Amino acid sequence: MPTHIGIVGVSPEGAALFYQQVTRWASRLHSPREQPRITIHNEPLSLYLDAIRQNDWHAVDRLLRRSADLLHRCGAQCCVCPDNVVQHALQMAEVGSPIPWLAMTDLVAEAAARDKRSRLGIIGTQLVSNSSTYQTHLGVRGIRVAAPEPDEAAALEQIIFGELIYGEIRPESRLQVLRIINHFAAKGCDGVILACSEAPMLITRENSTLPVYDAADILAEAAVRRSLPV
């Protein structure tokens, strides 16, 4: 039987989109009779936001571990989290976890390295775009990361926390994010990371002027491939 995949949700909208991505990859890679079991557990988003705003990554770790423990009790054999901000705490959550974790940051870096990218722009919250979340993993592969300009980062923060996490999509917000991607292209970027699980609501491979590395979708594919029967 395929591996039972556990999904640790943070943003409900991001977790819902990720569930769709997993099931779509499952339909591509599995036969109809070999679809993986999938279980999602989501602690309240407010608990994560409070911990992150207080820079309390041990609290984030405890939330992730609580979900992993419950997923394990439901029969999950591995767990994944599509939320980019909490990737900081995954290494802590992995310690003593009853089931293995699959992290997205290395997967994105591997995909970009295979495509021989040299510089990637990043679409995400300020905490993600201005931290080592992706920079370290890409840097060791010789790939530079371009963060949005301060005014662009502030606009992204408002779009993500004011709209996307509530499932809202304003046309002007989509245009604003597309302009940021165009600015990345003008600065010499040869790709862009969607480092926000809700970003595919705005940006797709069809409307972006740069090749897109959707971190959550890359993670979904890897989780499904891992679930394939040996």
Image (spheres, rainbow, N blue to C red):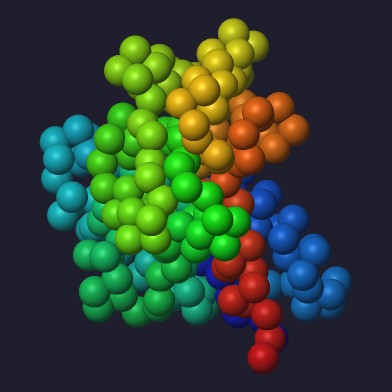
> Considering depth in this image, is 205 or 49 the residue closer to the camera?
205
Q: Is residue 86 visible?
A: no
> Measured along the vertical axis of the image, is residue 195 above or below residue 35?
above
Q: Position of residue 211 (x, y in %)?
A: 63, 40
> Considering depth in this image, is 108 or 157 the residue closer to the camera?
108
In the image, farthest residue toward the bottom: 230
Q: Position of residue 73 (x, y in %)?
A: 43, 75
Q: Position of residue 2 (x, y in %)?
A: 67, 81
In the image, farthest residue toward the top: 172
Q: Residue at x 64, y 73 (%)?
A: 225
Instruction: Locate the N terminus by quadrant.
Output: bottom right
Q: Residue at x 84, y 75 (%)?
A: 31
> Measured along the vertical axis of the image, is residue 222 above or below residue 115?
below
Instruction: Locate the C terminus by quadrant.
Output: bottom right
The picture quadrant where one finds residue 152 is top left
Q: Residue at x 47, y 47 (%)?
A: 118
| 11 on left or right of 36 | left
Q: Position of residue 157 (x, y in %)?
A: 37, 22
> Measured along the vertical axis of the image, is residue 136 above or below residue 210?
below
> Measured along the vertical axis of the image, is residue 207 above or below residue 76?
above
Q: Residue at x 57, y 62 (%)?
A: 114
The picture quadrant where one finds residue 111 is bottom right
Q: Is residue 122 visible?
A: yes
